[in-house]
């Protein structure tokens, strides 16, 4: 049951479904789509019940202190799925007290690493056992295709936890050469209570990137989910406890950023905060940490990642992966390949094929088999994307496909492609976070390097070329945390992910993420008559 | 010419020099009658020794040239022995930081620094270390003049450590490895450990050259370029070694040095949009401001080395004489101006009275005077502001009913000399047991058992360092793990070898300097993934 790679699965599914005909949006004035229609009309009933809507604090599901709740909505319809407890400052305080106790007095950092790893392995087994239920909940709350949840994301959730379970008993300090008669060693200790704030685009994967290394290193956690997608974390939180996690080690608080999120970031008894979300909110988080107790901060923020197609690239493959790089997950990826730079010699061919591919994209109820694209997560995102599309049109980019909403309910948007995009257009600078591909033209490598790097972001890049020198040169010159060469969105557990510049601070996944959850203590002891130094 | 350890050097100089000096220079201790502030002190503070060095560099070092500040303004740097002006120094401000960043940006973006081989970079750093040794006496004299620390300490401990640290990081330059990474499928995965870019570095006045080394060493080894702001109290030595770096072959623009003040030059560096990383050493309050400026500008990653209130724990089975000597050293070293000073001396109740008596005797023997004079253990505090602050805390100690065992007043009537001061019967809730005093004031507290002292030692917003004195391996191992502090010295203190990481838990900072760990501060990690066709293995 190896987990499957996002990219390979998606290319497979796209080739399976690309034959479905869809009408495209050709002339700008009209906003009419006769499309896929049927799948939008009848909303499929999700094969899962919502069991947990309360906060998970100290091993128990509890109401919020205020008793307040908020609705979590189905992006397919905008209708309420469930009312969920709304955590606020007092709930964060309760969660921190529980996490503090589990760390300061509790069994978690005092267990052997082997015991901790066994609990994480058991949790991964339970995830697999409940795969379909978890996947259905994730799709219902988020709107992503069920096939993507069930076949990629939930298996990756188990995969990431097994990866970090394996690290738990392999966290080594060092013995260090001294300049004289001292024995020097470093201890890599858990930091303490980690606050973690995760986004709505990949609720469970973001949970695994955060919880996996924090727990492996022996920390306890207060996790805040996104208000758009609180449900799946509560279910896996229960499974964590079924796997034997002691109470208070992981506490999950649903709620909003300005209340619960801010309380975490500014809490004096939280030793570390990790946040994934927008750059603007990341700045606030860091500022709250600076004004409170200087807790260490990891940030995974926005991006405007270049996808560079050189003239010698395999154009068909580049088209497919550029499409995937942008449209995957409804375009709601921080590392979306959202600036498609194409060499002038292959530009026209590329645009034609990219447009054709977008027009073949199958949009519809994400629970339906064969669907490639579901709705955007909520009305705020939906409106923001439509605003950017208008912006693209207004600024003179050529709208090749799409450009409007799809159907009349929920938050579906047509796969949209702009060509003739210029660097100074807003659609080439801002993170749109939706199914809007912007294709730009370039002439030579120096130019595309300069333009690709001319962004406040530095999260990821795609490079398409058959030439080894071009690949090596671009891979060094691009100021980004991930470079995918002739591939995109490869997210194995071992591969570090994170941003240069204003795309963030620190790395998650892989060995690098352990640093985020460890303190280094140097211990120096005077030694008498040493046999060697 | 191995660098010598501060602690061993200091203990050596004590044993060699202090008996003689302490006999010939009897000083009256301050023994109880609180209001008296009279000290018959060393003649050393009376006659001012002329430093054997000229001030050659007082201008900003930008793009390989010494230049005036854009405003033309200067500020005086003072001799802590007298409060008199040593020299007027160019006062850098936002415009100068902009010029420096531009030079650093060019040296990074267009080269040559990150485009050189690591071996070439290491050769320049090694040549620099040789030049430091060649100019050891001038550097030490300048450091002492500007800072007030003893010349012997500057000359025999700190300057050799400066060279040692640059040789250490020169050796790292060509050993910065990325990883190849196991994938879950047909992909070749590697990580590149790249320089971040332009590093902004803001250093304090207590160890101007060592802080320079901790910052500049790893940044250069990793291929970054630098804009360094010195403390306004101690701008001189950094310019001097900046000149030596140019002599060693460092290309222009790689290391830019701006003297100036925190609120102007420091703030513009921390909030600069073209600075990719910031490292700061100083107070916790300023550290919070720096991090806020980074958050509000371009989210540059920030390393912070901040304040401390480090416990020094003496268990009943400790070698008391050694513990007294090292507790004294842990606090009084460098006029008490160390972020990791052992400023809460916890002593087990069974040995408490003996310890206090001996600690007082040792403090009374401490030789205070002109730092250029041989055999002097303690010079003046850095400036009038610090002097006033330390005196205020001494008054606070007296007022809160700690027992003043000795010291408590000024030494002499000019400059910023303070008597080595010891308080006993200090309680955890007194200000002198909570705040960082940053002066020659030892606070001795009593404890009864291990659980209690662990809890009390950890009950602080700081977590920089700790000393543990015991002969029992179980006690040592238990306390080492339980203390929330970045460094634990067991039966030693202030061991600062280049390879040992240093930094804080809690509000003592973020990140580690020195050792292999400091490289992380100056590297970005890039994951590179390529598909494999028909791989021989995965």
Image (cartoon, rainbow, N blue to C red):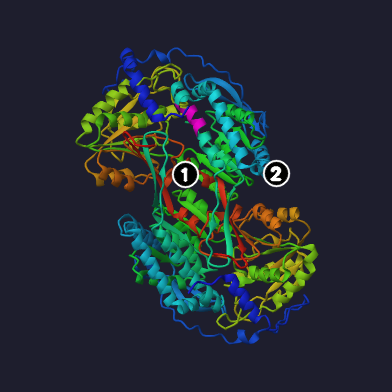
Q: State left or right for residue B87 relative to residue B399.
A: right
Q: State left or right for residue B77 relative to residue A114.
A: right
**Secondary structure state at the residue bearing disc 1:** loop
Residue B216 sits in quarter: top right
Estimate the x, y position of residue A473 in percent, counting from the top left.
68, 53
Residue A164 sits in quarter: bottom left
In the rendering, which numbered label is found on residue B110?
Answer: 2
Which residue is the extreme one toward the front? B536
Marks 2 and 1 in Cβ contact (< 8 Å) = no
Seen from the viewer's position, the closer of residues A473 and A322 is A473
Classify A260 as above or below B409: below
* Residue range (magenta): B157-164
In the rendering, which numbered label is found on residue B512?
Answer: 1
Q: State left or right for residue B472 relative to residue B130.
A: left
Q: Is residue B226 visible?
A: no
Classify A415 as above or below A218: below
Asked if both marks, 2 and 1, belong to the same chain, the answer given is yes
Estimate the x, y position of residue B254 in percent, counting from the top left.
64, 37
Seen from the viewer's position, the closer of residues B186 and B66 is B186
Chain identifier of the residue bearing label 1 in the image: B
Q: Is residue B158 magenta?
A: yes
Residue B317 sits in quarter: top left
Q: Residue at x 43, y 73 (%)?
A: A127
């Amino acid at each position: 049951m190896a987990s499957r790679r996002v990219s390979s699965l998606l290319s497979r599914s796209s080739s399976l479904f690309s034959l479905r005909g869809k009408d495209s949006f050709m002339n700008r004035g009209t906003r009419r789509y006769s499309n896929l229609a049927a799948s939008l009309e009848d909303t499929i009933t999700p094969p899962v019940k919502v069991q947990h809507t309360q906060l998970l604090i100290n091993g128990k599901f509890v109401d919020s202190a205020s008793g307040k709740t908020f609705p979590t909505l189905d992006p397919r319809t905008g209708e309420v799925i469930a009312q969920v407890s709304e955590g606020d400052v007092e709930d964060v305080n309760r969660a921190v007290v529980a996490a503090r106790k589990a760390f300061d007095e509790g069994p978690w950092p005092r267990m052997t690493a082997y015991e901790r790893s066994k609990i994480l392995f058991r949790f991964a087994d339970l995830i697999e056992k409940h795969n379909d239920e978890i996947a259905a909940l994730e799709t219902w709350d988020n709107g992503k295709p069920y096939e993507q949840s069930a076949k990629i994301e939930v298996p990756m959730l188990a995969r990431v936890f097994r990866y970090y379970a394996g690290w738990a008993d392999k966290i080594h300090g060092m013995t260090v050469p001294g300049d004289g008669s001292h024995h020097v060693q470093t201890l890599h200790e858990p930091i303490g209570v980690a606050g973690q704030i995760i986004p709505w685009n990949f609720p469970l994967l973001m949970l695994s990137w955060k919880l996996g290394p924090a727990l492996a290193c022996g920390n306890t956690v207060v996790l805040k989910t996104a208000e758009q997608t609180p449900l799946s974390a509560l279910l896996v939180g229960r499974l964590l406890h079924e796997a034997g996690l002691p109470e208070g080690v992981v506490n999950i608080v649903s709620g909003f950023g300005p209340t619960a999120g801010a309380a975490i970031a500014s809490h004096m008894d939280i030793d570390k905060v990790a946040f994934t979300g927008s750059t603007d909110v990341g700045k606030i988080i860091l500022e709250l940490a600076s004004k409170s107790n200087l807790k260490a901060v990891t940030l995974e923020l926005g991006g405007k990642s270049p996808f560079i197609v050189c003239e010698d690239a395999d154009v068909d493959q580049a088209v497919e992966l550029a499409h995937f790089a942008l449209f995957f997950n409804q375009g709601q990826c921080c590392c979306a390949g959202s600036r498609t730079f194409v060499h002038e010699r292959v530009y026209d061919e590329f645009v034609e094929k990219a447009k054709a591919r977008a027009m073949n994209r199958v949009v519809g109820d994400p629970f339906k088999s064969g669907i490639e694209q579901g709705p955007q997560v909520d009305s705020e995102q939906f409106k923001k994307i439509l605003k950017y599309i208008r912006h693209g049109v207004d600024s003179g980019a050529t709208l090749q496909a799409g450009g409007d909403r799809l159907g009349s309910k929920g938050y579906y948007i047509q796969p949209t492609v702009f060509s003739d995009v210029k660097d100074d257009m807003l659609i080439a600078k801002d993170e749109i976070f939706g199914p809007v591909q912007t294709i730009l033209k370039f002439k030579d490598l120096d130019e595309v390097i300069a333009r690709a790097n001319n962004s406040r972001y530095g999260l990821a890049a795609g490079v398409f070329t058959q030439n080894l020198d071009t690949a090596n040169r671009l891979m060094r010159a691009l100021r980004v945390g991930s470079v995918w060469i002739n591939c995109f969105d490869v997210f194995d557990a071992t591969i570090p992910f994170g941003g240069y510049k204003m795309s963030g601070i620190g790395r998650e996944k892989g060995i690098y993420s352990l640093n985020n959850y460890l303190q280094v203590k140097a211990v120096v002891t005077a030694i008498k008559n040493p046999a060697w130094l | 010419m191995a660098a010598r350890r501060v602690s061993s050097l200091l203990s050596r100089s004590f044993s060699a020099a202090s008996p003689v000096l302490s006999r010939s220079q009897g000083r009256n201790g301050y023994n109880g009658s609180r209001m008296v502030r009279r000290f018959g002190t060393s003649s050393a503070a009376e006659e001012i020794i002329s430093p054997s060095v000229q001030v050659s560099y007082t201008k900003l070092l930008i793009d390989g040239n010494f230049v005036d500040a854009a405003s033309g303004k200067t500020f005086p740097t003072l001799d802590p022995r007298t409060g008199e002006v040593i020299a007027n120094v160019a006062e850098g401000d936002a415009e100068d930081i902009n010029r420096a960043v531009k030079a650093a940006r060019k040296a990074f973006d267009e080269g040559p620094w990150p485009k050189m081989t690591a071996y070439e970079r290491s050769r320049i750093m090694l040549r620099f270390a040789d030049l430091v040794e060649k100019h050891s006496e001038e550097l030490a004299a300048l450091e002492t003049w500007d800072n007030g620390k003893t010349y012997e300490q500057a000359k025999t401990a700190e300057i050799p450590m400066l060279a040692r640290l640059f040789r250490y990081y020169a050796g790292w330059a060509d050993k910065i490895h990325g990883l190849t990474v196991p994938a879950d499928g047909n992909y070749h995965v590697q990580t590149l450990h790249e320089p971040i870019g332009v590093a902004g570095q803001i250093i304090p006045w207590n160890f101007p050259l060592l802080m320079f080394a901790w910052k500049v060493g790893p940044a250069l080894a990793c291929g970054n370029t630098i804009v360094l702001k010195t403390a306004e109290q101690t701008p001189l030595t950094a310019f001097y070694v900046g000149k030596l770096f140019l002599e060693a072959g460092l290309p222009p623009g790689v290391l830019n040095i701006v003297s100036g003040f925190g609120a102007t030059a420091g703030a513009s560096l921390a909030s600069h949009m073209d600075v990719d990383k910031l490292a700061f050493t100083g107070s916790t309050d300023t550290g919070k401001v720096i991090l806020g400026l980074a958050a509000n500008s371009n989210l540059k990653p920030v390393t912070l080395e901040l304040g401390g209130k480090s416990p020094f724990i003496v268990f009943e089975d400790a070698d008391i004489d050694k513990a007294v000597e090292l507790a004294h050293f842990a606090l009084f070293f460098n006029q008490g101006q160390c972020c990791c000073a052992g400023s809460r001396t916890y002593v087990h109740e069974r040995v408490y009275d003996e310890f206090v008596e001996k600690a007082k005797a040792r403090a009374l023997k401490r030789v205070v005077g002109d730092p250029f004079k041989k055999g002097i253990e303690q010079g003046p505090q850095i400036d009038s502001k610090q002097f006033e602050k330390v005196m205020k805390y001494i008054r606070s100690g007296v007022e809160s009913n700690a027992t003043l065992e000795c010291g408590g007043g000024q030494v002499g009537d000019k400059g910023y000399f303070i008597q080595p001061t010891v308080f006993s019967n200090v309680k955890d809730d007194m200000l002198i047991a909570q705040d960082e005093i940053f002066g020659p004031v030892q606070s001795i507290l009593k404890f009864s058992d291990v659980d209690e002292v662990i809890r009390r030692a950890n009950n602080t917003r700081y977590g920089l360092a700790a000393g543990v004195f015991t002969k029992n391996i179980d006690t040592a191992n238990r306390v080492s793990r339980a203390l929330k502090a970045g460094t634990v010295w067991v039966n030693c203190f202030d061991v600062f070898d280049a390879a040992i990481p240093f930094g804080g838990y809690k509000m003592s900072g973020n990140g580690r300097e020195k050792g292999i760990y400091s490289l992380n501060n100056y590297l970005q990690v890039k994951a590179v993934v390529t598909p494999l066709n028909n791989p021989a293995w995965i």
